[in-house]
Amino acid sequence: MVAVRPIHRPASVTGWIVPALLAACVIFLVVGSLESSLFAQQTVSGLANGGIYASLGVALVLIYRATQVINFSQGALATFSTYIAWQLISWGLGYWPAFLLTLVIAFVGGILVELVAIRPVERRGNVLSVVIASIGVLILVEGAVGWIWGNEVKFMPSAFPAREYHVGGVAFSMQDLGTIGVSIAAVVVLWAFFRFTKLGLAMRAAALRPEAARLAGIRVSWLLSLGWGLAAALGAVSGMLAAASPSVLLQPSMMDGILIYAFAAAVLGGLESPAGAVVGGLAIGALLNLMGSYVSWVTPQLLLPAAFVLMLIVLLVKPSGLFGRTRVRRV
Amino acid sequence: MRTRASQLCVVGVAAAIVALLPFGLSDYHRSTGADVAVFVMAILGLNIVTGYTGQISIGHGAFMAIGGYTTAILTHSHGWNDIATLPVALAIGFCAGVIVGVPALRFHGAYLALVTFAVALAVPQLAENYSHFTGGTEGLALPTQSGWWLYGVAWACAAVLYATTWVILRGRTGRAFRAVRDSEVAAVSSGVSLAVHKTLAFGVSAAFAAVAGSVYVLINNFVNPAVFGLQLSLYILIGAVVAGLGSLWGIVVGAAFVQLLPLGLSSGSIVSAEAVPVVFGAVVIAVMALIPRGSAEVLRAAVGLPVRARSSHTSTPPSLEVR
């Protein structure tokens, strides 16, 4: 085993770079939006995509913090939940009741996946096996979606009316604003849960210091399952928002590409910081959308490789991301 | 020496079965048999880098795509002979593996899985984008070959790569690979260069996958980005898991499992073809939970070879723990 322990570097050395960079990005977006209405529109719809990446990214961060495992099945579980929502709606349930019921089902489903597929493998105690098991879940769940609902594209209704608001010559669609609102609300609710409830505190303790938490009487293994449940519910929010967006089709492989953007978001934020994943998601959503509309050689096919290159650069240059802690590693 | 004799015996019987099998098959089933050889080569490649060197890769479909497109472009647009493209694919695959392997030096465990997963998704998108080389989504068509020819070429390549792998792994380089997997600290203090061996493992592994991709394209006599999608990368990983990471014994079993189970299930109408991924996913989880060294362990026991005691360690390198 190679020992890796976090060290706290004095913040003054590079501490100002990250806020300065973020401020520069925000100023760039605001000034650009004031200059051109097309720019403003592209920024808002980019931020809407970013909200989807952010909520899936936070789900990835939740599980990574608790178990140091990157959950490759996160996107497939989100797709499965979205199909459940579609099924409930097509049975005649209203959108919001279906939304809430889906969250509950996804929560229970996430716990079940942890209990059935991950825990027996994790008991052998290494990351590679758990990663492969999560890929097993990805294959199984994505296959189950295709088996149950078929591979043809379904139409997911949107929660928001197809209305547009005009502010100074810029048309903001309800769809974009609603997507940003719901994804940020979901993340804030989760943050409040971790910050202000006793259960949230116990979960943070179980993730940071499992042995000490166990000594303090916390049932760590149960809280890990609970973490998978919460991550699956958050993923479900992301999936339902994504399926309603005009650029995404509801099909079994819907979240494969979005998972990469969510990974890139989480990595940009440092992979351990939920706030970082939110900022990373919004930044990637806005930047990719602007690149797609302003840089002529960037075709839609190149957006995914672009996200990959961005992720690679972050990992090579600053592996702790914008908000992560620096770690040292022997060898 | 009894074990050596029984090992040779098993290898001989397996080779004889592979050599005689096409006589009893229809031409269509011969090309299916050639597909199994493709997965043998790809799983060999993945096993070198993941099973023996401890560097997880979920992106081997991307290296197959590189080999496949090399063959397709050279034969389709430049009129090359099919067989002559294979060494070129091998060389280009090796270079691609080194190019991915160098940044991969910085990543460990779960991060490397993440990066290679992204490679698996990004490469088909690139092939779709640069359509003047690759034919875009419509792809490139190649001349059709007979089942006999395909079976012969595919299994000959697989046999050569199998023997090469065995030679590499039993010697000094193989020991260095295993040392890197089992403990990086111990490997470095024994004078094993991590950078050289990790990159070399990636290069060799990708070269094998590229040859697999070339033969795959020859069998399909067609190539487009969808052929090399994420599913292919995942299937190689499933095959390697079923075969047993860190052992060469189960590779044909793993390849046959991935390639023949879907056909068997759908033709036997046991379950519908759509349910195949569900079965695959369940098998991967079950193997990881119950027999993490895969079918290799079962085969070794059957042949009378000692079952390795450290079963939870060899297949699952401790160096991958990022904590």
Image: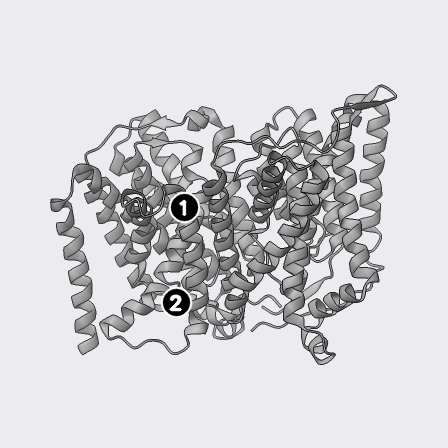
Q: Going 53% across and 31% down the picture, which residue do you hit?
A: A153
Quick check: can you spot residue A232?
Answer: no
Q: Going 45% across and 73% down the picture, which residue do you hit?
A: B312
Look at the image and tell me in which quarter the N terminus of chain A lies.
bottom right
Q: Is residue A71 left or right of residue A206?
A: left
Q: Are marks 1 and 2 in contact (CB under 8 Å)?
A: no
**Residue A128, percent across and down?**
51, 62
Q: Is residue B230 above or below residue A224?
A: above
Quick check: can you spot residue B149?
Answer: yes
In depth, the one of B2 and A169 nearer the eye is A169
Identify the element where label 1 is drawn. helix
Q: Give the mark toward the camera: 1 or 2.
A: 1
Q: Which residue is mark 2?
A: B293
Q: Residues within 10 Å of mark 2 (few under 14, many from 20)?
A: many
Q: Amino acid at mark 1?
A: Ala
**Residue B30, percent across and down?**
20, 42
**Residue B132, percent across and down?**
46, 24
In depth, the one of B206 and A303 nearer the eye is A303
Q: Which residue is mark 1?
A: B275
The chain letter for the residue carrying disc 1 is B
Q: Going 44% across and 56% down the picture, which residue do you hit?
A: B282
Q: Residues within 10 Å of mark 1 (few under 14, many from 20)?
A: many
Q: Is residue A244 left or right of residue B194?
A: right
- Which labelled disc corresponds to residue A65? none
In depth, the one of B164 and B268 nearer the eye is B268
Q: Going 68% across and 49% down the picture, which residue do you hit?
A: A234
Identify the element where label 2 is drawn. loop
**Residue B3, percent across and down?**
21, 75
Location of residue A164 (image quadrant): top right
